[in-house]
Amino acid sequence: MIVLEGNINKYMMIGMLLLITFSVKAQQQASAINQHTKQTPASNPKSGSGNNGPQFPGGMAAFKKEFVRNFRSRVLHNSGIKEASATAIFIIEKDGSMSNIKIESTDNEIIQDEFIRALKKIKTQWIPGEQNGTKIRVKARQPLIFTTGK
């Protein structure tokens, strides 16, 4: 979970609190992804069988830092939004890029658009997931929470 606390001042965001929960599911577990790629192994990943989930260079702290740098809290604040939570869902491709970025758990287009915009601005490539030595596409879920300061 990425928690943003924004205070409209010189730095716009203070009091950052981060609790990251990151879960990934291999492509075989997401039927929508299976329709796009036929090269991914069909068996479900098993622990200790040479399978690795995707990793962000520098870890999730680096991912959070890039996301926060790209996030414009003023957009939500100016729209009267003081709190927002959603779940980002995206695909980590075989080349490490993010694709199919979507936001769940909120119908507010302003929130969706800003979360998606901030995620799309992350240019650092992921280290892709692997199954039995073969790079695979992986579906990732990332909870996001925004709250304004006082």
Image (cartoon, rainbow, N blue to C red):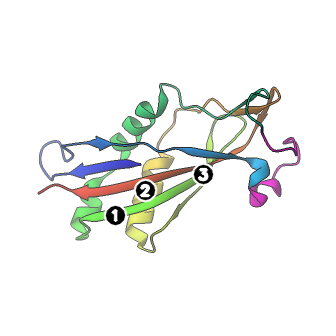
Return the mark for residue 106: none
Q: Secondary structure at mark 2?
A: helix
Residue 41 among those drawn in magenta: yes
**In the figure, 27 relative to 83: above or below?**
above
Figure label count: 3
Q: Going 48% across and 56% down the picture, which residue do you hit?
A: 116
Q: Is residue 115 above or below residue 11?
A: below
Mark pair 3, 1: CA separation: 19 Å
Span colored in magenta: 30-45
Chief SS of the magenta region = loop
Q: Which residue is mark 3?
A: 90
- Which is more N-terminal, label 2 or label 1? 1
Q: Which residue is mark 2?
A: 115
Residue 19: x, y in percent?
37, 43
10 Å crowding of disc 1: few (<14), some (14-19), many (20+) = some
Of the residues under marks 2 and 3, which one precedes in the sequence?
A: 3
Tell me where residue 107 appears, x and y as whole percent.
45, 74
Callout 2–callout 3 Cβ contact below 8 Å:
no
Q: Residue furthest bottom?
A: 107
Q: Alpha-carbon distance for marks 2 and 3?
A: 12 Å
Image x and y of residue 88, in percent: 51, 55
Residue holding disc 1 = 84
Is 100 drawn above or below residue 124 in the view shown? below
